[in-house]
Amino acid sequence: MYPIFITDEPDASVEIASLPGQRRWGINKLEGFLAPLVKKGLQSVILFGVPLKCEKDMRGTPADDPSGPVMLAIKKIRELFPTIYIACDVCLCEYTDHGHCGLLKTDGSIDNSPSVDRIAQVAVNYAKAGAHCVAPSDMMDGRIKGIKRGLIDAKLGNKCTLMSYSAKFASCMYGPFRDAAGSAPSFGDRKCYQLPPAAKGLARRAIQRDTAEGADIIMVKPALPYLDVIADAAELAPDHPLACYQVSGEFAMIHAGAAAGVYDLRTMAFESVDSMIRAGATLILTYFTPEFLEWLDN
């Protein structure tokens, strides 16, 4: 599954310096960008909105604006490439004026219940726009149950898959993504709602909670430093598809090592995802998707 960044500048094609070969794309550039990849076999994407011109607020109102980048991209891709499976990341950090993933109390801490309600509202609106899958990455407690209920009430429970970022760690490997999406928090950090790197038990509990609340797919993020958690997820949810996200820092790190002559880029890219498959992953989100399509065709 290929993560792509969609901006609200319709004709944008802007290089992301910290993510080699990746760009922010405007809605008018999607056909030219995706058509060669679809021809090579691209089957799925996950969309991340990058609003640059809208007015952000404390509720993340632009997240599901009908004229916003993600909503327009869903419809455009469905129209142009009806065979592509479209997932949408669901979070508020790109759209709030404070850059955090939920709504805040007056003291600046996360207000969980209204955050869940707002996240569920955004997810349902993406599904109504035509997303095949919604993927909440916010890490608010109880949001899987809230989204599943929202999808069922909207009569979309059997039409839209729910992929949960179940074990999302407070990693140092998200820097290039935050450059790409403009989603760094304006104060503090996200350690109060993402998992500490050593928290194996919390990760296991989160995986079990999300499967019980109705997640259709479980995800571990990042991937390479957390292969043990991927293996745990395969054990705890053996009947669920298991995704992992080879995040921006992993991708940039592999490129940096190859550029320094430490190893061959293609060989290391394959070795990295082979380890994820060996750990139990059945779906990998990776920025290497275009290269894999090319390499596997040769």
Image (cartoon, rainbow, N blue to C red):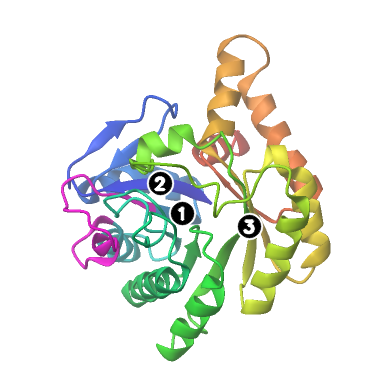
Q: Are marks 1 and 2 in contact (CB under 8 Å)?
A: yes
**Which residue is at the front of the view, 140 or 230?**
140
What is the quadrant of residue 124 in the picture?
A: bottom left
**Which residue is at the front of the view, 27 or 237?**
237
Disc ID at residue 45:
1
Identify which residue is drawn at 61% across, 22% down: 265
Residue identifier under label 3: 219
Residues in magenta?
48-69
Which SS class for mark 3?
strand
Mark 3 belongs to which amino acid? Met
Residue 217: give x, y in percent of width and height. 63, 66
Q: Are marks 3 and 1 in contact (CB under 8 Å)?
A: no
* Relative height, residue 155 to residue 139 (above, below): below
Mostly what secondary structure, the magenta segment? loop
Mark 2 or mark 3: which is in front? 3
Mark 2 belongs to which amino acid? Ile
Residue 28: give x, y in percent of width and height. 20, 49
**Which residue is at the front of the view, 24 or 169?**
169
Residue identifier under label 2: 4
Q: Is residue 74 magenta?
A: no
Q: Quadrant of the C terminus?
A: top right
Q: How many marks?
A: 3
Q: Mark 2 or 3 closer to N-term? A: 2
Which SS class for mark 1?
strand
Please state if 49 lies on the left or on the right of 88 as rendered. left
Instruction: For label 2, count other residues whose C-alpha is less than 10 Å away and answer few (under 14), some (14-19) or many (20+).
Output: some
Which SS class for mark 2?
strand
Please state if 74 lies on the left or on the right of 26 as rendered. right
Mark 1 belongs to which amino acid? Val
